[in-house]
Image (cartoon, rainbow, N blue to C red):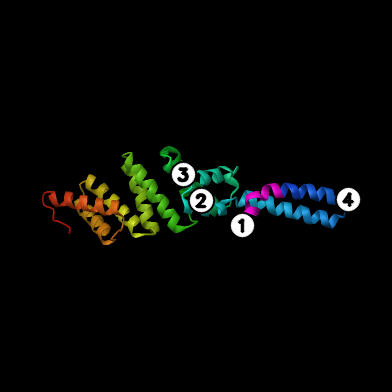
Amino acid sequence: MKFYNFLIKYRFWLGLLSIVLGVVAQLTVDKWTAILMYSLAFIALLSHFLIGPIRLLQKPIEEGNIEEVNRILNSIWFPNLLIKPVRSSYYTLKANMDMAQQNYTSAEQNLKKSVKLGGVNAEMDAANNLQMGMMALQRNDFKEGEKYVKAAIRTGLPDKDSQAMAYLAMSQIYLRRRENKAARDFFNKAKAAKPKSEEVVKQIKEMDKYLSKMPGQQNFN
């Protein structure tokens, strides 16, 4: 595994070295050795630009080493050359790093790029749409927020906490429009998801109290 990671980390330079060795072999050994070196160089350089070092991100992500994650992401010189699934993951990771640094403008731009690619991984697409929706709602862009949150629900969110967050967001959107029946329906779906996150559970309790105090509304416990 360490050797494989070494190849991924240095394959660009190994590719250049193979080209040099190919030239040397062509001049001093034979053409077949040169062809072998050129072939290795082609594979190394092609994989460097089409796949990149995304595989190296697993360990620093698990360790929460944001500095190393950023370093690896910044080593990708031409992200538009990455194949579609890798490019989508790249922009999602960039967005997550931006949000960790509270750079929400850049985070939104990168999320939009990932969402635009679409069709790579349904769960990732749904999570990205939900993040986009929540960011839009935070800046009071309810039309944009609703569009993305609905897209997240339609695509299929990967966990109960995300589902509850999406339903709560929709409930708040419909409450703002005074469409109380739709708001109740989405709120009940949020409760039915039975989220585990303390923050989401807290939001459900606060929404429950708010709804119970509305004229003509029932408590939803």
Tag 2 near tag 3, CB within 8 Å: no
Q: Position of residue 54 (x, y in %)?
A: 56, 52
Three-letter amino acid code at the position of disc 3: Met
Report if residue 113 is visible in the image.
Answer: no
Q: Where is residue 114 in the image (x, y as percent from the top left)?
A: 48, 48
| Label 4 neighbour load within 10 Å: few <14, some 14-19, many 20+ | few
Q: Name the residue under label 2.
A: 60
Spatial CA distance of label 2 from label 1 is 14 Å
| Label 1 neighbour load within 10 Å: few <14, some 14-19, many 20+ | few
Q: In which quarter of the image is the C terminus?
A: bottom left
Earlier-in-chain disc, 2 versus 3:
2
The one nearer the camera, 42 or 75, is 75
Q: Residue at (29%, 51%) from the top-left corner?
A: 199
Q: Residue at (73%, 55%) from the top-left corner?
A: 40
Q: Mark 4 points at which residue?
A: 28
Q: Say which mark, if any, is on residue 2.
A: 1
| Label 2 neighbour load within 10 Å: few <14, some 14-19, many 20+ | some
Q: Name the residue under label 3.
A: 97
Left or right, 98 with respect to 181, comes to right
